[in-house]
Image (cartoon, rainbow, N blue to C red):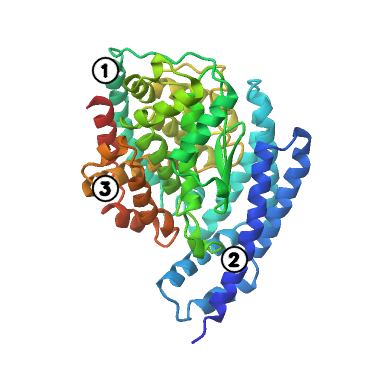
Amino acid sequence: MSKTAYESLCARHVRIYRLSHLQSIASWDQSANMPAKGNEARSLALAEMGGLLHQLATEPALQGLLEAAAQEPLDEIERANLREMQRAWRASNALPQALVEAKSLANSRCEHAWRSQRPANDWAGYAENLREVVRLAREEARCLSAVTGLAPYDALMDQYEPGMRSAEVDRVFGDLRQWLPGLIRDVLEKQSREAVTRPVPPFSLAAQKALGHDAMQLMGFDFEAGRLDESAHPFCGGVPEDVRMTTRYREDDFLPSLMGTIHETGHGRYEQNLRREWLGLPIANARSMGLHESQSLSFEMQLGSHPGFAGLLRPLLQKHLGDQPAFEVGNLNRLLTRVKPGYIRVDADEVTYPAHVILRYEIERPLIEGQIEVDDIPALWDAKMQELLGLDTRGNFKDGPMQDVHWGAGLFGYFPCYTLGAMYAAQFFAAMRRETPDLDARIARGELGLVFEWLRSRIWIEGSRWETPELVRRASGEALNPAHFQAHLRARYLG
């Protein structure tokens, strides 16, 4: 029997992929290079492209092709690809094209204005744009909910973490809420007795850029298939063949940029190592954003804050920033594992980081479900920041609810993926240690290829072949088990 319908579907998805390539690069350029006065035209162009891609993804002929392909003699890989095609078709058909275009335009306008509103602490101006973004996100959630039968917030989260439900997030985060505050207190008390020498600024931007480049090389990034630039908020975009990463710099502190760059390199290496022969097909996509964050956190936290990693970084710091007492290996390790409750999520240590994610989840879910409004966000933010991290954020919008690009860009349902990713990463490294008992000594010797090959063979090249629970089970031997994350934090910070 032939596979005519399946082959026709593949050809159509390759075309969508190639046009999405152009959309991705135009979106990256909007954040990294575009002059301010180009934003309205770029926003309109991206909305137009979003509409075109939506038309291609909802062509009436696709339904018949999907039904016909299901009856064809497909192998296991092709069946998995067809499953992902069906999923994409359902999600696309749930949304009217007018909504897709309106959402793209509102998100672009809000995100662009945010870049100047955040430094100005202009919550009122930001909130005006955010209301429209939220209105459209709620409409999107209703449309997806009607098709999937999921609750509105779950329908949005399912786009980033397929199969994950808020009931499971509530269970996992509820458990975190029980032990995390005590762990933070214990670590702060322990570290208060440790002397730490702070690096002496300034650190020139040119030196930091060169340092970041060398750190990316250490982590195996392929510069012939990607690059690093600057943006208001660090991110990884582009396409697997041309990964576009960004970071941001401060002359008074090199660590946020360095660790942010290492974080984004984890995302970039995942994309660069997706199976090449599948590219253009849905099966080649990274499995989920939780899995994506597990890779960035494997690089930034599991490796970047590993006791042996300071010895690998020290020569790079000496080369680019000069020699300082702060760069002594033991002191550098204390710097990399310093726990201090702070305002900014992307600069947070791995112990306090989950509190930032819990805060956002506990605000965005009722926001999407209509239980609260945009104007309620600052007071809720202040209360939860005080409760979770003991910090006063009243009136400090730029370091409070305006610090992240996500809500302004319409990315509701994404935040849980960060802490789910931290849990997956801890679980993967626990599995690596079972298989390679001397893993930690080998990391300290700079034998990082062992880690990268494990991730490549278990996660990267599998793309979306397996649904998330099955992929995690095959990689680590068990389903998501948050106990590994707690054990990792206790061992590293209290052991």
Task: Provide the secondary structure element on which disc 1 rests.
Answer: helix
Q: Quadrant of residue 111?
A: top right
Q: Which residue is mark 2?
A: 13
Please state the horizontal and vertical placement of residue 84, each as a whole percent of the image.
49, 63
Q: Which residue is mark 1?
A: 190
Q: Which residue is mark 3?
A: 431
Task: Provide the secondary structure element on which disc 3 rests.
Answer: helix
Please state the horizontal and vertical placement of residue 201, each as a whole percent of the image.
51, 14
Q: Amino acid at mark 2?
A: His
Please state the horizontal and vertical placement of residue 138, each as a whole percent of the image.
58, 45
In the image: residue 472, left or right of residue 47:
left
Q: Nearer the viewer, residue 345 or 338?
A: 338
Relative vertical location of residue 219 with respect to residue 281 in this rendering, above or below: above
Say whether disc 3 or disc 1 marks the residue closer to the N-terminus. 1
Cα distance in 3D space between marks 3 and 2: 35 Å
Viewer can see residue 105: yes
Q: Nearer the viewer, residue 457 or 430?
A: 457
Label 3: few (<14), some (14–19) or many (≥20) C-alpha neighbours in 10 Å? some
Relative vertical location of residue 182 with respect to residue 439 in this rendering, above or below: above
In the image: residue 276, left or right of residue 118:
left
Please state the horizontal and vertical placement of residue 129, each as a whole percent of the image.
68, 34
Q: Amino acid at mark 1?
A: Lys
Say whether disc 3 or disc 2 marks the residue closer to the N-terminus. 2
Quadrant that contains the C terminus: top left
